[in-house]
């Protein structure tokens, strides 16, 4: 047996007609009595709330006590402490002094510049080992300044012994590279001397990176050619790599070197870091000795090349001998 439910729509009806007259306004006395009655009613409600709620033991108030309500209100009304601002990293600069090994007096003055500079020493140069030992003893980073073939033939006349050439076979290339590296055992990395031609060739750069990885060295591209592929090949071979941002002393006058130093600061402020390359010229030594004392005013810090290496670089190819 099924039970059937039916719904009915209730239509409101007026059983009493609405009067068609207007009530007279209440008298002043009746208004006062009505106001007094309303105030008394409100007071009675407040008293009842005070007796039944405020003075009721907390467990009887239900699932949320007055204390809990009060705490919740405080959470929303009290000012929240502002999140601490993350400190902005200080822009970093690093400086390499190239062509060390041929001018002992100037080289020694350059090594005496205060700070974490790196010194790129020409292989088989007359004062290579002496300058390498001096730099290491003074806590400086030592690099091998590896000569490589340039596009302009007149520059190739000054490459010196131990140069790498485009016409070399792989065996000749690797043998020369290993002899150069072994001649400067305190070197932790390599940068190129000239090389505007050789750094454009992927095959020769692959040979170079294989040799550096085997010897646990990093590579700094002096970037003598905008067409250099050294960086790309270094990444493919998992060799730690950095590149030069600013040449400091293409012109050997103090005004030019000062402007280039400020360009180095500007690049560091823009990119977070920058690498400058100079040479042991008297003008360069004077400018650096002065300007490196003003780094706080410029808002940058001088750091070692090692500190500029990107996090995550494979540890098996990081330098194992750092200048102390």
Image (cartoon, rainbow, N blue to C red):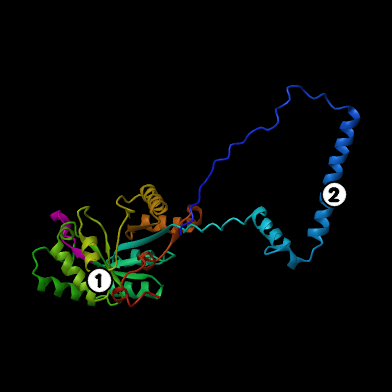
Q: Residue furthest front?
A: 1
Residue 217 at what x, y percent from top left? 27, 72
Q: Is residue 281 visible?
A: no
Q: Is residue 10 left or right of residue 198?
A: right
Q: Residues within 10 Å of mark 1 (few under 14, many from 20)?
A: some
Q: Is residue 76 above or below residue 144?
A: above
Q: Residue furthest top?
A: 21
In percent of the image, x 37 and y 54: which residue is there?
283
**Residues drawn in magenta:** 146-158
Q: What residue does disc 2 label?
A: 44
Residue 94 at what x, y percent from top left? 38, 61
Q: CA distance from mark 2 to mark 1?
A: 107 Å
Identify the image quadrant of residue 228. bottom left
Q: What residue does disc 1 label?
A: 126
SS assignment at label 1: loop
Q: Residue 153: within the magenta?
A: yes
Q: Is residue 27 visible?
A: yes
């Amino acid at each position: 047996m099924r039970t059937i439910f039916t719904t009915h729509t209730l239509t409101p009806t007026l059983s009493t007609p609405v009067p068609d007259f207007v009530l007279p306004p209440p008298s002043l006395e009746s208004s006062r009595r009505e106001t007094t009655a309303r105030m008394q009613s409100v007071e009675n409600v407040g008293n009842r709330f005070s007796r039944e709620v405020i003075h009721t033991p907390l467990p009887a108030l239900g699932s949320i006590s007055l204390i809990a309500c009060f705490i919740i209100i405080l959470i929303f009304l009290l000012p929240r402490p502002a999140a601490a601002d993350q400190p902005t990293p200080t822009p970093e600069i690093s400086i390499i002094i190239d062509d060390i090994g041929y001018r002992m007096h100037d080289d020694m003055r350059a090594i005496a510049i205060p700070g974490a500079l790196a010194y790129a020493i020409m292989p088989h140069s007359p004062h290579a080992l002496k300058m390498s030992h001096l730099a290491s003893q003074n806590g400086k980073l030592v690099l091998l300044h590896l000569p490589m073939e340039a596009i302009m033939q007149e520059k190739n006349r000054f490459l010196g012994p131990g140069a790498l050439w485009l016409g070399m076979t792989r065996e000749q290339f690797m043998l020369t590279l290993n002899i150069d590296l072994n001649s400067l055992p305190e070197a932790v990395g390599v940068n190129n001397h000239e090389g505007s031609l050789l750094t454009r060739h992927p095959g020769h750069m692959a040979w170079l990176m294989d040799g550096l990885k085997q010897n646990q060295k990093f590579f700094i591209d002096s970037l003598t050619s905008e067409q250099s592929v050294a960086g790309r090949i270094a990444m493919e071979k998992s060799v730690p790599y950095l590149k030069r941002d600013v040449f400091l002393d293409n012109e050997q006058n103090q005004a030019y070197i000062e402007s280039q130093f400020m360009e180095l600061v500007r690049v560091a402020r823009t990119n977070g870091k920058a690498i400058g390359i100079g040479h042991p010229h008297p003008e360069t030594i004077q400018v650096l000795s002065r300007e490196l004392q003003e780094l706080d005013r410029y808002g940058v810090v001088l750091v070692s090349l090692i500190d500029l290496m990107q996090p995550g670089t494979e540890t098996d190819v990081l330098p194992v001998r750092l200048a102390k």
